[in-house]
Amino acid sequence: MRLFAPKYGWMLVMAVVLTLFALPATAQQERTTTSRNTPTLSNIVRQQLDQRPITMPRSQRTIIRKGMMQQTDTMQVKRDSVIYEQMMHEMDSALMAEFQADSIRLAEERTDDLKTLDSIALAEYMMEGIVPDTTKRFFDKGWFMSDSMGLSRVSWMSAIVPGYGQIYNKQYWKLPILYGTLAAGIGMYIHESKVYKPLKRQYEAITDVSMERTPELDALQTKMIRSNTKRQIYLGATIASYIYFIGDAAINYSTNEVSTVKKATTLACICPGAGQIYNKSYWKVPFVVGGFASLAYCIDWNNRGFQRFKKAYALLADYEQNPDNYPNGPTDEFHGRYSSTFIRNLRNNYRRNRDLCIILTGGLYILQIIDAHVDAHLRDYDVSDDLSMNIEPMIDYTYMPTEGNHKPVIGFNIGFTF
């Protein structure tokens, strides 16, 4: 009975009360644990919610740019960073392969270059089931007419295909004039040649036997000379029209930036004197044109002399070898007044002079090209009369390694203007 004394009674009461309250809570916890372990729909949803990542407080959102794709915030879209980075890399690579052309794509864009298949084009062809020859070089379909051709190529193509330069420069209205002029000149030349050639054959048939002058031979020669003159005029007009339109294509070329030096040199190559006209050195044109005209006349003169003494030597040599065939004596132009050796020397002299004039014509052609090229270079050259010398004092500081500091240097600057 002393155990239950009032002194300790209140402690016993408190222990009993706590025991009574703890038993229901433990049972409830066991029931809750058991229910959560039960695989029901609510338990599955509760487990997924418990596994959600904890959203940490963030600062202001930052946009990260990489490649050609704008990368969004991975925390905001709640994606795994590794998977998302791999996906972005694949998409960015696809876009780069689509928009950033490499060598073969650049070659496909251009139309004036040779191209060779490289890895990307080869992969595209292989995906389509085509196996191309990677070692074969071929022309692109637009090599004949592209938008980036140089002046030299346009000029050469115009020389091969008349009217090419006008088509390239989109001056189509000039084509009827060009082709009309060329067709008319060539047609008249062919027509006059049909008249000239029979007359020439008839004249040569007579002169091969005898060079004796008769009224019939003089009349035939006059008709032949007139017909040949017309024929040469028609041919000259055709050639002049042809050269003019090549120069016209070069002058109106404006696709790429061309220096005045290149254009003047190109025009001089196309037509003698055109480079001097382009450089506005008009006083040189008479010398160029006069030089070519004089040499052309000398070539024609010496060629006619060569043909004349060639025929005379042939008749005289045949007479000396077969005198029985010529009962009336020599039938050459000089009727035997000169020996065959003398006439042969004259023939060789005329031929040598003709060949020399041809060489001089080529030299004059090259000389006028060089003159146009140099003159175009010197157009902006300062050729003023300012010839002076300037002397100015100079003070500079030079580092002296032995003394470890800078020392002043005093001197003079001398400048020459010439």
Image (cartoon, rainbow, N blue to C red):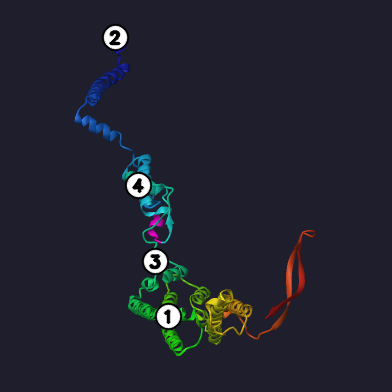
State the SS at label 3.
loop
State the SS at label 2.
loop
Dot 1 surroundings within 10 Å: few (below 14), some, or many (20 or more)?
some
Q: Residue 156 location in percent, x, y?
A: 45, 69
Magenta stretch?
105-111
Residue hosting label 2 = 1
State the SS at label 4.
helix
Residue hosting label 4 = 125
Q: Amino acid at mark 2?
A: Met
Work out whether 53 lies above or below 95. Answer: above
Q: Amino acid at mark 3?
A: Asp
Q: Earlier in the sequence, mark 3 or mark 4?
A: 4
Q: Amino acid at mark 1?
A: Gln
Q: Earlier in the sequence, mark 3 or mark 1?
A: 3
- The mark closer to the camera, 2 or 3, is 3
- What whole-number distance in Å separates the C-alpha atoms at marks 3 and 4? 27 Å
Work out whether 332 lies above or below 91. Answer: below
Q: Earlier in the sequence, mark 2 or mark 4?
A: 2
Residue hosting label 1 = 202
Residue hosting label 3 = 147
Q: Main secondary structure of the magenta part?
A: helix
Q: Quadrant of residue 318?
A: bottom right
Dot 3 surroundings within 10 Å: few (below 14), some, or many (20 or more)?
few
Q: Earlier in the sequence, mark 2 or mark 1?
A: 2
- What whole-number distance in Å separates the C-alpha atoms at marks 3 and 1? 55 Å
Q: Nearer the viewer, residue 284 or 59?
A: 284
Q: Residue 185 location in percent, x, y?
A: 38, 80
Q: Amino acid at mark 4?
A: Tyr
